[in-house]
Image: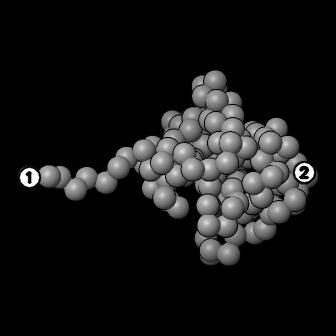
Amino acid sequence: MISSLKPSPEEMYRRRLASAPSSVQLLIENIKSHFSLRNDSFSHHTRTHGGDLRVAIPGHLLGRKVLRNFGTLSWRPGLKLVTGRAYLSPEQMMGHAIRYAAKPKKQGEPLLSDFWLQEGECLRATKSIIDALEDARLKMMRAYEAQS
């Protein structure tokens, strides 16, 4: 009998990114590489939007049992956009030279801003996105420290 197992989130992510422009692939791989060097955060994948990238803080560093995402990124081929969310306000994102950021429409969304990049902006925005995600990580860690 043939099993109808869904592909893993990482496989879905790889398939979605395989058809993305090289600038998009490079942006996302640079973000993954940056956070793989840290011991206080890591990247992982979910099936959202057909496979996305999440950056998270391990739960034990926040006094929690589960991880806490501070950023997400996804390639949306139909829109030709990289979309994401971060634990920074839209104004803080724009302070990192991210031109398109807004408050999420979804009520109760724990991440504070939605942002998007056009495919042609990806190479120029790599450092800005990494810096914004670093600030989002620090902001989240401070928020949890203040709660303890």
Query: Can residue 144 be seen?
Result: no
Classify 37 as above or below 51: above
Q: Amino acid at mark 1?
A: Met
Q: Which residue is at a point 60% across and 28% down the rendered structure image?
A: 36
Classify 43 as above or below 19: above
For the image shown, how many numbered marks are present on the structure? 2
Q: Nearer the viewer, residue 113 or 124?
A: 124
Query: Residue 1: which disc?
Result: 1
Q: Nearer the viewer, residue 19 or 14?
A: 19
Q: Which residue is at a point 67% across and 48% down the rendered structure image?
A: 21
Query: Hey, which quadrant is residue 86 in on the image?
Result: bottom right
Q: Which residue is at a point 69% across and 70% down the rendered structure image?
A: 104
Q: Amino acid at mark 2?
A: Ala
Left or right, 124 with reference to 107: right
- For disc 1, the neighbor class at 10 Å (few under 14, some 14 to 19, many from 20) is few
Q: x, y (%) of residue 96?
A: 88, 48
Left or right, 37 with reference to 117: left
The residue singled out by tag 2 in the image is 97
Classify 105 as above or below 99: below
Q: x, y (%) of residue 90?
A: 82, 62
- Whole-angstrom CA distance, mark 1 to mark 2, is 53 Å
